[in-house]
Image (cartoon, helix red, strand yellow):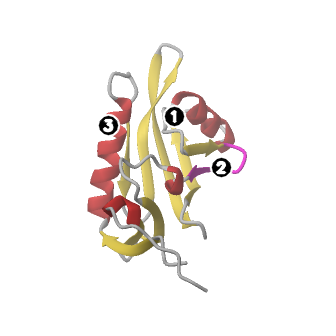
Amino acid sequence: MQNQSSEFIIRTTKKNLNDLVNAYIEQLLKNTKHHYEIILGDDVLLLGELPVFSSTVPLTVHFEPLVQDNGDVILKQKSISIGFLELPNKKIMEYMKKYLPVPKWVVIDPKNEEIYVAVTDMDVKSNFHVSVDTIDLEANNIALKLKVPYETLGIETVKMKD
């Protein structure tokens, strides 16, 4: 059978990916009282606020991004703090899971102190399929795979005769 799609590698920068991620987060948090942002530096930094009693406290989490074979990403927690509160990392991650709005394809896992980003499950407003190929933040080397099904472009595939 002939190919049903073609795959392209798209290289980008931390700034471009950072702008895209934060535009998405801004849209996600629209009409909520929540606030957080991602900063891509030598690692992935999440800055935000978590509700505590009738107030909020600053949240700072550093993650190491680990690309999985399937193109998803695990953000492995390196360091974490919530204001001046002395809480175990897992407890802070539990608060994050409970109070931090994330898309359905992002799973906060307090037990393993990580966030699973199922990039391959993102809802993309096309038939394109996105996955991560490479993330090397220190080298500013970020590459995404974009799979384009031929049907998206109106190309019909034909079966090859044996």
**Inter-mark Cα distance, 1 to 3:** 26 Å
Report the magenta residues as a range.
110-117
Q: Are marks 2 and 1 in contact (CB under 8 Å)?
A: no
Question: Mark 3 or mark 2, which has the lower sequence index?
Answer: 3
Which mark is in front, 2 or 1?
Answer: 2
Answer yes or no: is residue 137 visible: no
Q: Which mark is residue 141?
A: none
User: Counting other residues with Cα less than 10 Å from the Cα at mark 2, is it few (<14), some (14-19), or many (20 or more)?
Assistant: many
50 left or right, relative to 94: left
Mark 1 belongs to which amino acid?
Answer: Phe
Q: For numbered disc 3, what is the local secondary structure?
A: helix
What residue is shown with label 2? 113
- Which residue is denoted by mark 3 in the rendering? 26
Task: Please tell me whether mark 2 sits on a helix, a strand or a loop.
Answer: loop
Residue 35: % across, % down = 37, 32
* Relative height, residue 134 to residue 96 (above, below): below
Q: Crowdedness of circle 3 by 10 Å Cα count: few (<14), some, many (20+)?
A: some
Inter-mark Cα distance, 2 to 1: 20 Å
Amino acid at dot 2: Glu
Q: Nearer the N terminus, badge 1 or badge 3?
A: 3
Q: Earlier in the sequence, mark 2 or mark 1?
A: 1
